[in-house]
Amino acid sequence: MGLSVRLWRSRQAAPIQEQGMALPVALIIGALLLVASAGLLVKLMMLRSAGSAESYKQLAELASGNGLSRVLAKLNDSQTTDISYLWRLSQDEQLDPVGTPLRQWDLGETDLRPLMEQPCAPLNLNADAKSILKGGDLSHGANLRSDGRPDSVAISYRLRSYSYSPGDSKATFTVEGYATQGSGNRENVLARSLLTRVLALKRLMRSNDDWGVIAGKTMALGPSTIEGNGKALWLLDTAGASRFGVAGACNPSALGSALGSSNASLQTKLWPLQGSDFPSPGMFDQLAALDQVSGTNPSQRRIWNIDDKRSTTCTGGALSNGSTGDAICTRGETSSTWTSAESAASVKRSGGAGSSITAITIHADTICGGTGTTQPCLIWMESIQLRNGATLSIETASSGGARPVVLRLLRPQETINLTSGKLCQADFSASASSPLLCSSNPKAENLAIVASNGDGASSCTTATQTLKFGGSSLPAALVLMPQGTVAISSGASMNGLLWAGNICAAPGLAISSNNTSGTSIIDGFKSLWRWDSSLTFGRTITRGIRGTGLDLFRRW
C-alpha cells in the first residue's frame, strides 16, 4: 500500500524542467487578451467616429436637398409674391468667384428691366424672399444629433450659383448644405455637401386675359381698343428693350406714347415682350387639307386671284370700255395660265356680263374636295382686291359642321385690299346655285388669314405685303402675318386676333376677343387648332420642373 502511494505521487509530480512555466504562460495569455480587448475597443471607437462622420455628411446632404426645395418653392409660388421673373436671370453667389460674378437678382430696377423677358413685370423680390433664395438655417434652434458634445448640431444651406440657359430653357442650381455645431465664433463645420440639379423651365398663362389679342413689332394704335380679355403685345429685340432702363418707362402712359396709343384703357393692356416671336404659321398647315387643281398628276396646289374691278379677262384679254373682268381667276402652281372660275353660283353682278360685281362666294363644295368633311381647308391666295364695293363670302361650314378655311398669301409682295369691300364668312347652304350672304353669327377662329413670309416693313408707308381694311370690312377672322403689315384705312371694328409684324392703326381699331355669340375666340382658337399647352403667347409666369438629369451630390 505504501509503495503504491509513493508510485502514484511520483507520476503526478511535474518534470523538473517544466516547473516555473505556469506564471509566464498566464502572463502571456493575459497580455494577448488585453491587446485583443484594446483592439476591439479601438475598432468600436473608430466605427463610432466613422458613423458620426457619415451621419454629419447625411445631414449636410439633407440640408442641401431641403434648401433647394425651399428655393424652388419660393420661385414657383405665384399665389403670394410672384417672383418667377427671376427664373430667367442668373445669380452667382460663389464666395471666391472667378472674374466678376453675374448677380442679376441684385440689380436695381433700371439695370434689371432691360434684361427681363417681360420688362414690365412687377418686381416683387423683398428681403424675406431674398433670404430664402440665398440661404438660411433649417434646424430652427433644435439639436439634430445628441453626440455628447456641449453644443447642438444644426443644418443650413446656401445658394452657390444659379445659371439660366435661354437656348434650351433650362436652369442649373448649385446649393451647398452644411452640418454645423455651435454658433458664432464657436461654430464648427462638421460636414458639407454640394448639390447640383438641372431643371426644365415652362411658361404658363394664368388666364385668357393674359393672351395677346393684338401683337406687333412696330405699332401705331391711335384710339384702338380691346373689348373682352386679352392684351396688346409689343415684341422687342434687345436693342428695343434698352428703353426700359429709364425710370417710369413701364407706366401705361409712357407705353402708350411709344406705340401711338391714345386710349387709356388700351394703355393698361400694353405688354412688352423681349426675345419672343409670333406663333408659327405652320400650325395651320398641320391640320388643314390643301386646295388643289382637280385632275392634275402630280397634284398641284391651286392659286387664287380675286378682284372685283379687274380691267382684263383672266387670260389678259382686253375688255370693252367700262366693263369689269372676271372676278375669280385660278391656276395651278406650276402654270402661268390663269382660267376663270366665275359662274352664276359664285359671282353676282349688277347687270349682264361686264357689269359691276356685287357679291362673290367661295362655296365649300368647290374647295378641298367638297363639303363631306369638317377638316380645315387651306387656300393659296395671290391677291384679293375688293375696290368696288363687292362682298366676298367664304363658306366656313359643311353638312357635318364647321369647316374652317385658311387663306395663305402666296408671296411676300401680295396684298389683300378690303378698303371698298367686305370679306366675311357664310353659313352652310345645301344649295350652291348662287352667292351666299354673310353669316350673322360668324366664329373668328373659322377664318384665318396667314402669311409665312413678308417684307418685314417697320413703316406704314413702305410696306408691300399688306392687309388693308376699314369699317366692318373684316367682321371676324384670325390674322397672322409675322413679317407683314396690317393697315387700317378708316376706323374699323372686328372680332378676332390680330398678330402682324407692323400694325398701322392710327384711325383706330375696335377689336373684340369674343364672338358675336359671346363665346371666347381665344378658347375657340386653342380648341380648334389644337394649341399645345406648352406654347404661350402673352403675359406668362415661369415654372421650374424636374428635368431628365440626375441630382449630383459632392461631399467634402
Image (cartoon, grey):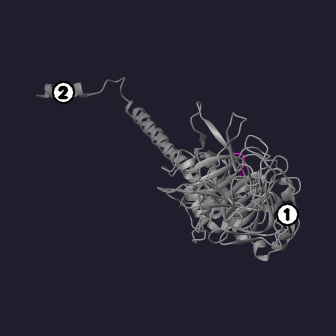
> For the N terminus, which image quadrant?
top left
User: Which residue is at 18% across, 27% downward?
Assistant: 8
Q: Earlier in the sequence, mark 2 or mark 1?
A: 2
* Residue that carries the numbered disc 1 in the rendered image: 244
Is 208 in the magenta? Answer: no
Between 497 and 66, the one lying in front of the other is 497
Q: Position of residue 147 (x, y in %)?
A: 54, 58
Question: Residue 106 location, x and y as percent?
Answer: 80, 62
The residue sitting at 54% across, 54% down in the picture is 432
- The x, y position of residue 341, in whole percent, is 64, 46
Towards the viewer: 73 or 54? 73
* Image position of 244 with respect to 64: above or below: below
Type of amino acid under label 2? Trp
Most extreme residue toward the bottom, as rendered? 264
Total numbered circles? 2
> Which stretch is magenta?
162-167
Residue shown at 77% from the left, 41% from the top: 316
Position of 167 with respect to 151 (left or right) is right
Count residues near mark 1 (Cα–Cα under 10 Å), then give few for <14, some for 14-19, many for 20+: many
Left or right: 298 as drawn, with respect to 351: left
Q: Main secondary structure of the magenta part?
A: strand
Q: Quadrant of residue 217?
A: bottom right
Indicate the secondary structure of the residue bearing disc 1.
helix
- Marks 2 and 1: which is nearer the front? 1
Q: Is residue 155 visible?
A: no
Q: Amino acid at mark 1?
A: Phe
For disc 2, the marked residue is 8
